[in-house]
Amino acid sequence: MPDIRMDQVEGNAPDEVNTFTDGSVTNPPKKQWSVASYGLLHTDRTHDGTPITPMEDLLTNTHFSDDGLEGWGAVQGPRASSTRSELAGGIAAALAPYPVHIGSDNLSFVNKAKLIIDGNIKVSSKPWQLQNDGDLWDLFARIVDQRGRWSIRVSWVKGHAKQKHLNRGITTPWRKWGNDYADNIAANIGHKAHPDGLHTLGEHLEERHEMYEDLIHHVHRVIVQTFAEDQRLRKQAKDLEAPPLLPKGTGASWSRKDSTTPNSKIQ
């Protein structure tokens, strides 16, 4: 984990979103072989106005476009998830050296990020190391502390919004445009940050994983069926060896006097 050093940021976060982030995960549903990436857009940011900081340059691939600063990167670590990729994008966005209002379509990331920004996360009872994606949450919390809680906000924005969501007021044209922009970076550019062939390797391993699962399920069924058949045969053999039993309630009984021997007298 890099040693993050960030200067305190002056000014409060704006009311409207000015930075959009999104994450992308491929090769689901097996998280062990998934490959994740993130994308972000700092809207209206220019090289002359706000150049790339050394910390941003260390953690994020960047490119200035007519729409602002685009950023993307590979998400490291096993068991990639949508929340982990969104969190990585949030970390990259929080490195901006000016007040930021991050818009993300991942509600899990947004809710926990708000708790951290508001100072309502208690890590004394459950350290970051014991929490899901705790390595990245720890990093996000340290960045928030260093830059100043007043200088960053996080809001949920509707992902993959359509006209009906605009009509209902669930999102706005601005937020739809920004989310679609970040999603495109994450899906089409962010995954290129991974080494060549990693996606193919993940797909191959996922296929082998499914084959092993099928094999184990088959072996389990054979074991269960074999055990059941063994119990049936044992019971069958035991029933054949047991002496016949007289029906209950007949009053019949057997004693030694009833037996006949060669010396018995016939009256």
Image (cartoon, rainbow, N blue to C red):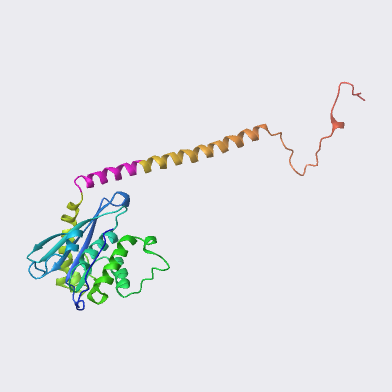
Relative side of 189 to 219, left or right: left
Position above or below: 120 against 90: below
Relative side of 221 to 169, left or right: right
- Residue 213 locus on image (x, y percent): 37, 43
Q: Is residue 206 magenta?
A: yes
Which quadrant of the rendered structure holds the C terminus?
top right
- Residue 22 locus on image (x, y percent): 21, 62
Q: Which residues are magenta?
A: 195-211
- Residue 226 locus on image (x, y percent): 50, 37
Q: Residue at x 22, y 75 (%)?
A: 151
Relative side of 37 to 115, left or right: left
- The number of callouts visible is 0
Q: Residue at x 62, y 33 (%)?
A: 237
Q: Is residue 58 magenta?
A: no
Relative side of 180 to 48, left or right: right
Q: Quadrant of residue 93?
A: bottom left
Between residue 9 and residue 204, name the one nearer to us. 9
Q: Quadrant of residue 164?
A: bottom left
User: Which residue is the extreme one toward the top?
Assistant: 262
- Residue 150 locus on image (x, y percent): 25, 77
- Magenta span: chief secondary structure: helix
Between residue 18 and residue 176, name the one nearer to us. 18
